[in-house]
Image (cartoon, rainbow, N blue to C red):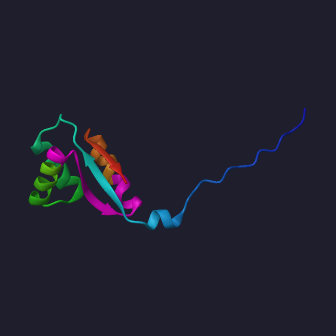
């Protein structure tokens, strides 16, 4: 039996990519109430009630809103928390 050597593929970890500013975007889902989304934005993204209300209106009428900006490592836990509340969120 011959042993074949497999070259390990390195994980792509570009530090420049991680340092770039990204946006956490919340998408409209036509399921949750305004109050539910507002409450989630206040608790998870540290929005003021006014910020959360404005974002929720933009999400409702425009389909999406960038609710937070920052580096990817900061935004990932926020995205997970929004998804756990069954909200549609993505990082761009």
- Quadrant assignment, res 6: top right
Quadrant in which the N terminus appears:
top right
Give the percent coordinates (x, y) of residue 40: 19, 48
The answer to whether 53 is drawn above or below residue 15 in the figure is above
Quadrant in which the C terminus appears:
bottom left
The answer to whether 70 is drawn above or below residue 64 in the figure is below
Asked if the stretch drawn in magenta spans residue 67, the answer is: yes
Residue beneath the point at 20% across and 60% down: 46
Residue beneath the point at 30% across and 46% down: 89
Give the percent coordinates (x, y) of residue 33: 12, 39
Report the side of 37 relative to 79 (left or right): left
Of all residues, the one furthest to the right in this rendering is 1
Give the percent coordinates (x, y) of residue 37: 16, 45
Residue beneath the point at 10% across and 57% down: 49
Report the side of 9 relative to 58 (left or right): right
Residue beneath the point at 50% across and 67% down: 16
Report the side of 52 relative to 14 (left or right): left
- Quadrant assignment, res 20: bottom left
Q: Nearer the viewer, residue 48 or 58?
A: 58
Q: Nearer the viewer, residue 60 or 90?
A: 60
Asked if the stretch drawn in magenta spans residue 65, the answer is: yes
The magenta span reads 59-77
Query: How many numbered discs, if any?
Result: 0
Q: Nearer the viewer, residue 81 or 25?
A: 25
Of all residues, the one furthest to the front in this rendering is 62
Give the percent coordinates (x, y) of residue 3: 86, 39
């Amino acid at each position: 039996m011959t042993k074949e050597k497999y070259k390990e593929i390195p994980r792509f970890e570009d530090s420049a990519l991680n340092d770039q500013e990204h946006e956490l975007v919340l998408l409209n889902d036509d399921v949750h109430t305004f109050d539910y989304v507002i409450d989630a934005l206040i608790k998870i993204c540290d929005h003021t009630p006014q910020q959360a209300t404005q974002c929720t209106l933009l999400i409702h009428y425009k389909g999406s809103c960038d609710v937070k900006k920052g580096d990817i490592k900061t935004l990932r836990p926020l995205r997970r928390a929004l998804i756990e509340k069954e909200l549609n969120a993505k990082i761009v």
